[in-house]
């Protein structure tokens, strides 16, 4: 997953936003977290997803294609934020090419890959056996 550097949001910048972004980095489920992304299937301008949906195994194959443009705490607010992004694009460029407008304006940050819990479990077992001399 990727995220633009200065993500669009309706959440108060500071502690609240940082807490939501940390959940994204840790791939932890979150209540009331909606993401505005570029379309996964390359059809349309932007899409709104509940963050927990993107944690499902089906979306693992799309992980490198997901670019987060906005973060919101309510679906209605996410729709309003999406409208603001499109209006800003139209005012700045005179067109509806949101992707090229955001690409030219913001840099993209790669979120770290999801940790493999199986590998961590094996590492923990190895550490225990080494400590006990097994």
Image: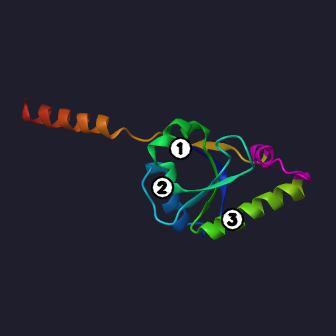
The residue labelled by disc 1 is 111
Side of 103 relative to 65 (left or right): right
Q: Crowding near pointer 1: few (<14 within 10 Å), some, many (20+)? A: some
First-in-chain label (2 vs 3): 2
Corner quadrant of residue 43? top right
The residue labelled by disc 2 is 52
Q: Nearer the viewer, residue 61 or 124?
A: 61
The residue labelled by disc 3 is 79
Residue at horizontal 65 percent and vertical 64 percent from the top: 78
Q: CA distance from mark 1 to mark 2?
A: 16 Å
Q: Is residue 89 above or below residue 42?
A: below
Magenta region: 93-104
Q: Would residue 10 be visible to someone looking at this image?
A: no
Q: Crowding near pointer 3: few (<14 within 10 Å), some, many (20+)? A: some
Q: Which mark is residue 92?
A: none
Q: Nearer the viewer, residue 111 or 49?
A: 49
Secondary element at tag 1: loop
Q: CA distance from mark 2 to mark 3?
A: 18 Å
Corner quadrant of residue 82? bottom right
């Amino acid at each position: 997953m990727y995220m633009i550097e200065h993500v669009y949001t309706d959440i108060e910048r500071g502690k609240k936003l940082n807490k939501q972004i940390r959940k994204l980095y840790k791939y932890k489920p979150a209540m009331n977290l909606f993401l505005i992304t570029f379309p996964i299937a390359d059809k349309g301008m932007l899409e709104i997803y509940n963050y927990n949906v993107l944690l499902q195994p089906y979306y693992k194959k799309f992980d490198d294609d997901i670019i987060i443009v906005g973060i919101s705490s309510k679906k209605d607010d996410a729709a309003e934020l999406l409208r603001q992004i499109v209006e800003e694009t139209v005012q700045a460029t005179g067109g509806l090419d949101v992707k090229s407008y955001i690409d030219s304006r913001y840099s993209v940050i790669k979120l770290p890959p999801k940790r493999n819990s199986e590998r961590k479990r094996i590492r923990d077992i190895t550490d225990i056996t080494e400590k006990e001399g097994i």
